[in-house]
Amino acid sequence: MSSTVSLQQLKVELELLEEEAEQDIAKAVDEDSLEKLRVNLLGKKGRLSTVLGAMGQLPSSDRPLVGQRANVLKNQLQGLISQRLQLLKQKALADLVAKETIDVTVPSIGTPVGKRHPLIQTSEEIVDLFCGLGYGVAEGPEVENDHYNFTALNIPENHPARDMQDTFYLGENLLLRTHTSPVQIRYLEHNPPPVRVVAPGRVYRRDTVDSTHSPVFHQVEVLAIDEGLDFSHLRGTVMAFLKAFFGDLPVRFRASYFPFTEPSAEVDVQWRGRWLEVMGCGMVDPAVLEGLGLDPDRWSGFAAGLGVERFCMVRHGIDDIRRLYTSDLRFLDQF
Ligand code: DAH
């Protein structure tokens, strides 16, 4: 602005400023550029200040006119800027909301949920049914020693019954347990009768795999020791359990032999027109009780060993035991 500034010039300058400022404010796209614009227009070194500075060169009679006009313009621009600011804030919020909106109708990709293996389900169901009859639950190690797996169960060294359980030995004295019966001994060592207990678990035998054999399988051991227990208690318990598990399938007891029970029996259920063995059982042999320091004239009891795979296969109509070990999810997903 030259030193010979005129009233007319300043008026034009203010009009120009007004026109441009209004357009620029309306075009500001975000808060940052609006703020820059505000400083540019109304700041200490802004365009309006420049006009006011030049006003000093006017004759004093002209100054109020320009001053008044500049003040009105200042208020007007401040108003426009704060309106625009309001609008930009609303727009920013709306954009954010639009960007972060979740479409709850989009189908989910699903989270795969694991479930218990059918063998574990079956084992748990068996254990549950016995718990309903007042039994507790016990466990024992899968690596056993000769004493618990055989000797304490009345199976002395060189007894032919050891051959029936072709065995994985881990050394002189250690082996993978061939049945859950050793838990009977371990439990009675620490729990004086009366006892009622079931022991589920994995057992091992040197068997060749086919549709009904596996070198690893599962049993649930049952043990009840009390005063005055006899075979009718065994039979009543087994019948009540089988009815609860299978419903009304026909059941038969067959005389059998186990070194740790006398008398012994095997229990079959009739399924698909034939008899299927599902457990061995019997009255605990007095020799086993004596070995534990229990008086067989006072204490008696019964025991049973259930094959979990059999129960599972009958329950679900599974024709090949290998299906239970191959971890094929197309199969396992059905249970
Ligand atoms: N331990 C036997 C086996 O694995 C099954 C068995 C039979 C368990 C009779 C028992 C029993 O408790 O009384 O072949």
Image: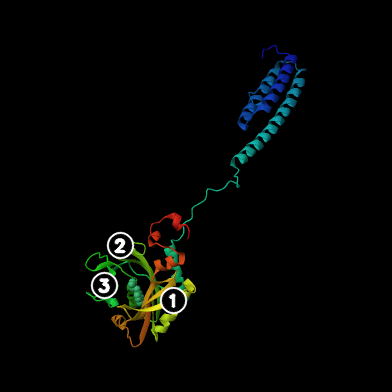
Q: CA distance from mark 3 to mark 1?
A: 29 Å
Query: In the image, what residue type sits under mark 1?
Result: Val
| Residue at the (47%, 77%) spot, across then down | 240
Q: Which residue is mark 2?
A: 208
Name the N-terminal-most of marks 2 and 3: 3
Quadrant where the N terminus lies?
Answer: top right
Give the side of residue 143 with respect to residue 31, left or right.
left
Whether disc 2's CB lies below 8 Å from ligand 1 is answered no
Query: In the image, what residue type sits under mark 2?
Result: Thr
Where's residue 174, x and y in %?
25, 67
Q: Is residue 170 above or below residue 328?
A: below
Callout 3: SS: helix
Name the N-terminal-most of marks 3 and 1: 3
| Residue at the (45%, 78%) spot, across then down | 239
Q: Mark number for residue 162?
A: 3
Q: Is residue 242 above or below residue 37?
A: below
Farthest residue toward the bottom?
297
Q: CA distance from mark 2 to mark 1?
A: 29 Å
Along the viewing direction, whichever of 102 and 65 lies nearer the viewer: 102
Evaluate if marks 3 and 1 touch, with contact meaning CB atoms under 8 Å apart: no
- For the question of whether residue 280 can be seen, the reply is yes
Where's residue 281, x and y in %?
37, 77
Mark nearer the viewer, 2 or 3: 2
Query: In the image, what residue type sits under mark 3?
Result: Arg
Q: CA distance from mark 2 to mark 3?
A: 18 Å
Give the side of residue 16 with respect to residue 36, left or right.
right
Whether disc 1's CB lies below 8 Å from ligand 1 is answered no
Evaluate if marks 2 and 3 touch, with contact meaning CB atoms under 8 Å apart: no
Q: Mark number for residue 251?
A: 1
